[in-house]
Image: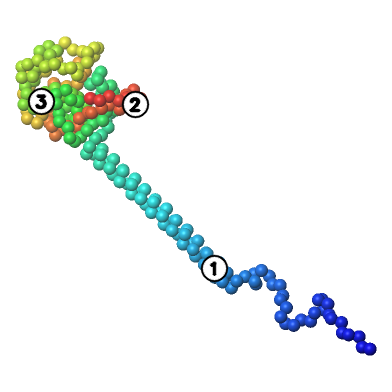
Amino acid sequence: MTDPPIAPTSAEQPFDGQSWVQTPSSETASPSDGPLLNQATPNAKGRATGVLARHSRHLLEWVVVVVLAVLAAAGLRAFVMQAFFVPSGSMQPTLQVGDRIIVVKVGYTIHRGDIIVFRRTPADTSSTIPDLVKRVIGLPGETISSRGTTVLINGTPIKEPWLPRLTGICAEAAENIPTTKIPPGHYFMMGDCRGDSADSRMWGTLPASYVVGKVVFMVWRFGHPYFHWF
């Protein structure tokens, strides 16, 4: 009697050409994975380029803003207002040497008692300081003179509420203003320190063309911020 055939075990199963063989994970990846990975690099570069472009644009905008601000400040200084320091004691005690004052150059009207900054006239040989500061006492067309310590305009005494009490070198027994007819477009200037001021009493009237501007406030005194409106 012949024995029946014995079925082969799993280890002995013949290879039929269809059994799967395990491959590395890189070989089992979808064929579309490669192109997707390849597309990621250009996208990242594009995003980086966009960020760089935005930063460059913002930087350019700031440069333009700074340049315009500098030009505006220069224009402001040249045409609108400017800071000056007080160079001498002729306006003491109202202004002290070294005070920082702000002068407006446009849109103002000059009145008696105003403090103005002006360029030194050729007739003033007492100083080499290019810009001076004094107070307007006489206006165009008026006749100015004095009697003792009183200023006369067209023969009439005027009050000077802006003038502080003068002591020491600033005090004087008489104003010593020669009778002067102020020409049109000119001003008669005096320092508050009447006893120690080289002003229109010495070098004559000031042409309006020499006026730089009107003092509007003070911002600095004795090495510290100090605010005072005039």
Marks 2 and 1 sit apart, C-alpha to C-alpha, by: 67 Å
168 vs 26, left or right, is: left
Residue at the image position 18 percent from the left and 12 percent from the top? 172
Residue identified by numbered label 2: 225
Which sits earlier in the primary sequence, circle 1 or circle 3?
1
Q: What's the distance in space between the residues labelled 1 and 3, CA to CA? A: 87 Å
Q: Amino acid at mark 3?
A: Leu
Q: Quadrant of the N terminus?
A: bottom right
Q: Is residue 17 visible?
A: yes
Task: Point out the frontmost of discs 2 and 1.
Answer: 1
Q: Position of residue 185 (x, y in %)?
A: 9, 31
Say which quadrant the C terminus sits in: top left
- Image coords of residue 30 (percent x, y): 60, 71
- Labels in figure, total: 3
Asked if labels 3 and 1 touch by Cβ distance under 8 angstroms, the answer is: no
Q: Nearer the viewer, mark 1 or mark 3?
A: 1
From the image, tell me which residue sits under label 3: 139
Check disc 1: other Cα within 10 Å, few if <14, some if 14-19, many if 20+.
Answer: few
Which quarter of the picture shows residue 211? top left
Give residue 115's position: percent from left, percent from top. 20, 25
Residue ID for mark 1: 36
Q: Nearer the viewer, mark 3 or mark 2?
A: 2
- Label 1, secondary structure: give it: helix
Image quadrant assignment for residue 74:
top left
> Considering only vertical position in the picture, is 173 above or below 34?
above
**Callout 3: few (<14), some (14-19), or many (20+) C-alpha neighbours within 10 Å?**
many
Q: Residue furthest right?
A: 1
Q: Is residue 3 left or right of residue 47?
A: right
